[in-house]
Amino acid sequence: MTMKILTTAAVAAVLIATVPAAGVAQDLGSNFKRDKNTSVRQRPRPDYEAIGIKTGGFTLYPRVTVEVMNDDNIYAEAVNEQSDVIWRVKPEVAVRSNWSRHALGAFASASINRYSDFDTEDSEEYTLGVNGRLDVERGSYLAGSLQYQELVEPRTSPQSPAAALAPVEYTLLSGNLTGVKEFNRLRVTGRLDTKTFDYADAANRIGGVIGVIDQDVRDRDEFYYGGKAEYAVSPDTAVFASFTGNTKEYDVAAAGRDSDGYVATVGANFDLSQSVRGELEAGYMSQSYDNAVYDDIDGFSAKGRVEWFPTELTTLNVAGSRTIQESVAFGSQGYVSNNASIGIDHELLRNVLLAANASYGKDSYESIDRDDKRTGFNASAAYLLNRNVGLFLTYGYLKQESSGAASGASFKDNKIAASVALQF
């Protein structure tokens, strides 16, 4: 796997380096900028943004958030729901370069979670990462990132084992290398991604059973490689073709889940003045498994996001996707996940932001009789007191209905949280 990553990375670097240099027209502005419209979340608010601490050519941005949350179904179960109050502290720091060309950054964060009554749910999560960008010339660059995370799988995840005494812990090491070359109306992008998942075994909590729930069968390496070619038919619209291949290798070969696949799509991105911005793509996806017992999963693939700007103070967004995902359900190699959402952001005042989002998803499992349907709703309000202090109130609702002979968990979950963030 390592040799494959290094070899492909070398090929991508050579391809980027040998693309002809851009002409003079490129200096007049990119045909691929999509900044005619500015969403509520993107709009600059100089009076409420952290200044940071300057240290030479870098700026340090420290931040800490303290949150209290009430969750009325912490185990995500259909009966005998248990509620609890969760206290959470999230310290984080980011470092960013102040250079006129090129960029370098790093970040670190943690989430310390404490339950008032059910201390088996207590957890800590950590993230460390670095990223950078090498500007070759206008419109052309190389960018990369490396990130290490120690995470806890939410009880509401369809992959989370219901019998686990505590939430499943895992580490995720991910890396990315992207190369972009733009000249006149054509832009070419090459991309490599790698992910390594390592899950910890979980203790059993149901019926007094002593033992562990083996999670080693989930440990795996995922490698993605691909490219995208875009052609600008006008300064605000481009059409493109995209291809992404993948290889997934599990540490436990007996699981028989190793696979290779790809997604090939065509689409368009656009930013129409004072109106709509977005990207839509559709095509074909396929995943083939080494174990002959498992049939290939293939079919229609789609992904898209569109933002509508009815006023400068309101942004409406619609998103959707159809993808192939990994499964941990016994006897199933994977599932097709269909998701759609609609959301709205509104700037009530310069320092008061409101947001709401509704979502629906359906997972159809292969080789077993199981379908999961999810309905969600989220709402939030943010009050920015000044550039150093912000107050937040959020509400989240999730309902999952699992059906079929091999059905998983069905539940409803409500969460309401209040938090204060301090930044400098």
Image (tube, rainbow, N blue to C red):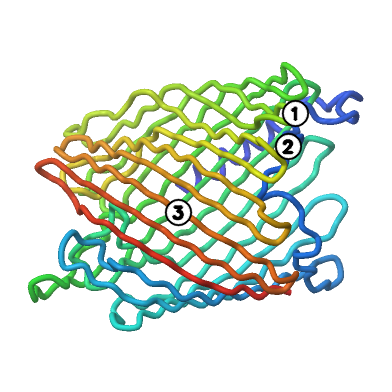
Q: Relative to residue 200, is residue 393 drawn left or right?
A: right
Residue indicated by mark 1: 273
Task: Tell me which label, 2 or 1, sits earlier in the chain.
Answer: 2
Residue indicated by mark 2: 37
Q: Relative to residue 215, is residue 386 drawn left or right?
A: right
- How far from the left and from the top, in percent, is residue 119? 31, 82
- How far from the left and from the top, in percent, is residue 289? 28, 34
Q: Are marks 2 and 1 in contact (CB under 8 Å)?
A: yes
Question: Residues under labels 3 and 2: Cα distance?
Answer: 25 Å
- How far from the left and from the top, in percent, is residue 367? 17, 35
What residue type is disc 3 on? Asn
What residue type is disc 1 on? Ser
Residue sitting nearer the eye, 103 or 76: 76
Residue indicated by mark 3: 378
Q: At 32% across and 49% down in the image, what residue appears?
A: 250
Task: Tell me which label, 3 or 1, sits earlier in the chain.
Answer: 1
Circle 3 residues within 10 Å: few <14, some 14–19, many ≥20: some
Residue sitting nearer the eye, 361 or 238: 361
Q: Does dot 2 land on a helix, a strand or a loop? A: loop
